[in-house]
Image (tube, coloured by chain):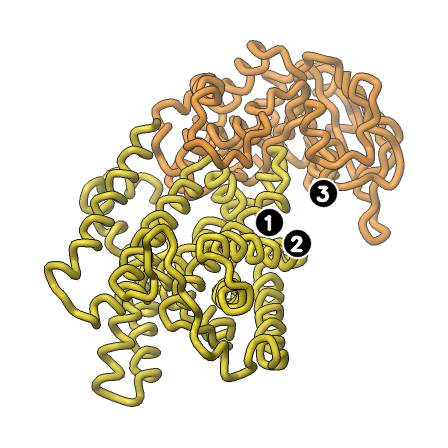
Chain colours: A yellow, B orange
């Protein structure tokens, strides 16, 4: 195995161990809730960054896959009584199928057209959820709780066990996405982002690569949705609303799009801001907007982009000066 | 051999290339010259499949390339470098070439392994050495000097192991000294790889020095063709092109 892959696995193992130990050292229900929500949203934000940061595909509708994941899993658990692992796999298949369908139409388009068509599909899905009341519960969401029967001795109805499951899914999901962006496919994606025309001249089928990226990103967003539906024991139309996609964009803007962990850090920042700001003022939207403006106009990039850039400049002044 | 027969292309009623018939023998080094707007870049776009001609044929060893996608034409062995270096700003030189080799060999979509693929690195090192880019292997393409960006663009074309290499003004935007270094590299590349090289160039000193044969385009037509000596003495060429050009210096 490549040394970089071993290093990633080691980091993943250490982070997972630390996360699992955290509530033992600091037993707090708020902490457990924070990490579970964070896991769901970090997977969502990182998957969005596969498209935005690595592929240059700015999707305004990525929340739809978070919604599809949450609703498919919730419905499967409520209506079929299948075991959780099976429902999880079926949800992945369903999300991939929806992403394939939507992606096949959207990724042919460029830039703003792509962004708005994804947004349109998201609004279509949201309307469908609102209108199809017998299946989805309409604007009330999937009510009555999602059954969480134990499997292999794991009881996800227990908040601590759900916490561990969320941490495992988070670390495994991040490791897989890390592998994707460091694979030959990941570098082809970067080439398309930088210069699609030239990539075509090198013999790459751009449509196929973009579509695969779109489906993979959709699947990981769907897994985020599954964690969220387990956490709230339901699914709500807001999961598939445009504001969900908007939050995803905020998270990657805050955290940074040029580093792999930027979106995860952005998720933590946004959740902390949400929790703290709402404690002090009811105008939290205004406060959040101001803070995001500060990032956009002040740093002109996410926090990790800024730090990495700063670190590079101080370490190798010659290398950065060369081109100027 | 690459040849074009009766090639024509108009844009909105304005003829950019009119009834052009030319031959480029295998392994030749040919300069295409002509005043601005003569249709030189359009000529390259037609050969490489970037645009489709209204009429005429582009024959590579007898096979008509007209109607093929540019990807298909690349696979047939025609590669090009661009007037403005067309590169990947956020990738390093080594990453760019490793990724280009993997794309050329059909591994662009591989998900199960880590980049770069070991079996692709040999070829990318070889091309880097060929063009003297090895020292810049870990430099971001965006931070390369103008000349090295042009070389990287040519390197990308070479990765495709072309039989015909089209170079659109390889020395554009360079100072006199850098120009000669660049053209020297192109010349040595041609000598070593034994491929057909066709280049567009404005600097007449360079053209007369290295090109085995010259084709002159003017207003989309072939004005003259021949060796450096024949072109230098051709009154039409002097009138249409060289006269104004030498006055400019």
Quadrant in which the N terminus of chain A is drawn? top left
The quarter holding residue B6 reads top right
Of the two numbered discs 3 and 2 in the rendering, the one whose residue sits closer to the viewer: 2
What residue is pinned by disc 3? B37
Q: CA distance from mark 3 to mark 2?
A: 40 Å
Q: Position of residue B29 (x, y in %)?
A: 66, 16
Q: Is residue A197 left or right of residue A67?
A: right
From this viewpoint, is residue A302 visible? no
Q: CA distance from mark 2 to mark 1?
A: 6 Å
The quarter holding residue B71 reads top right
Label of residue A104 in the image? 2
Q: Say if B90 sits above or below A73 in the image.
A: above
- Direction left: furthest residue: A25
- Are the residues flagged by discs 2 and 1 in contact, CB closer than 8 Å? yes
Label 2 marks which chain's residue?
A
Q: Say if A218 sits above or below B205 in the image.
A: below
Q: Position of residue A94 (x, y in %)?
A: 58, 57
Label of residue A211 in the image? 1
Q: Residue at x 62, y 81 (%)?
A: A131
Q: Say if A113 sits above or below B11 in the image.
A: below
Observer-nearest of A286 and B176: A286
Observer-nearest of B141 and A171: A171
Nearer-N-terminus badge (2/1): 2
Q: Residue at x 74, y 37 (%)?
A: B69
The quarter holding residue A154 reads bottom left
Of the two numbered discs 1 and 3 in the rendering, the one whose residue sits closer to the viewer: 1
Callout 1: SS = helix
Q: Residues within 10 Å of mark 3 (few under 14, many from 20)?
A: few
């Amino acid at each position: 195995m490549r040394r970089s892959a071993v290093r990633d696995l080691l980091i993943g193992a250490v982070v997972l161990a630390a996360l699992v130990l955290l509530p033992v050292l600091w037993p707090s229900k708020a902490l457990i809730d924070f990490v579970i929500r964070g896991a769901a949203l970090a997977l969502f934000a990182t998957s969005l960054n596969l498209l935005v940061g690595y592929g240059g595909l700015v999707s305004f509708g990525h929340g739809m896959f978070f919604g599809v994941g949450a609703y498919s899993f919730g419905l499967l658990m409520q209506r079929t009584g299948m075991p959780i692992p099976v429902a999880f796999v079926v949800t992945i298949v369903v999300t991939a199928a929806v992403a394939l369908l939507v992606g096949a139409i959207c990724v042919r388009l460029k830039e703003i057209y792509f962004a708005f068509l994804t947004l349109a599909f998201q609004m279509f899905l949201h309307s469908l959820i609102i209108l199809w009341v017998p299946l989805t519960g309409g604007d009330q969401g999937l009510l009555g709780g999602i059954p969480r029967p134990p499997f292999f001795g794991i009881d996800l109805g227990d908040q601590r066990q759900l916490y561990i499951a969320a941490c495992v899914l988070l670390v495994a999901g991040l490791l897989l996405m890390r592998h994707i962006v460091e694979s030959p496919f990941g570098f082809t994606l970067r080439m398309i982002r930088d210069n699609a025309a030239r990539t075509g001249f090198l013999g790459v089928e751009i449509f196929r690569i973009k579509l695969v990226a779109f489906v993979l990103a959709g699947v990981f967003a769907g897994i985020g949705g599954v964690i969220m539906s387990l956490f709230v024991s339901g699914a709500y139309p807001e999961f598939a609303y445009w504001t969900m996609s908007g939050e995803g964009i905020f998270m990657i803007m805050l955290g940074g799009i040029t580093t792999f962990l930027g979106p995860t850090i952005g998720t933590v920042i946004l959740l902390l801001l949400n929790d703290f700001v709402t404690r002090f003022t009811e105008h939290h939207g205004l406060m959040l907007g101001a803070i995001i403006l500060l990032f956009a106009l002040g740093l002109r990039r996410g926090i990790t982009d800024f730090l990495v850039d700063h670190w590079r400049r101080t370490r190798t002044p010659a290398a950065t000066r060369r081109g100027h | 051999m690459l040849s074009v027969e009766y090639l024509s292309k108009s844009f909105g009623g304005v003829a950019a290339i009119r009834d052009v018939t030319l031959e480029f023998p295998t392994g030749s080094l040919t300069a295409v010259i002509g005043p601005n707007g003569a249709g030189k870049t359009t000529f390259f776009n037609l050969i490489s499949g970037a645009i489709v001609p209204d009429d005429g044929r582009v024959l590579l060893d007898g096979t008509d390339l007209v109607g093929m996608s540019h990807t298909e034409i690349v696979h047939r062995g025609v590669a090009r470098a661009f007037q403005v270096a067309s590169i990947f700003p956020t990738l390093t030189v080594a990453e760019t070439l490793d990724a280009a080799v993997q794309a050329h060999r059909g591994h662009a979509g591989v998900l199960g392994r880590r980049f770069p693929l070991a079996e692709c690195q040999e070829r990318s090192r070889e091309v880097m050495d060929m063009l003297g880019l090895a020292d810049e292997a870990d430099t971001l393409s965006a931070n390369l000097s103008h000349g090295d960006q042009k070389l990287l663009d040519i390197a990308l074309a070479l990765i495709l192991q072309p039989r015909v290499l089209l170079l659109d003004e390889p020395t554009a935007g360079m100072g006199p000294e850098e120009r000669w270094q660049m053209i020297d590299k192109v010349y040595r590349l041609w000598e070593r790889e034994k491929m057909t090289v066709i280049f567009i160039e404005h600097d007449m000193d360079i053209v007369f020095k290295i090109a085995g044969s010259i084709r002159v385009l003017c207003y989309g037509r072939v004005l003259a063709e021949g060796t450096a000596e024949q072109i230098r003495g051709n009154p039409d060429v002097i009138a249409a092109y060289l006269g104004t050009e030498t006055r400019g210096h």
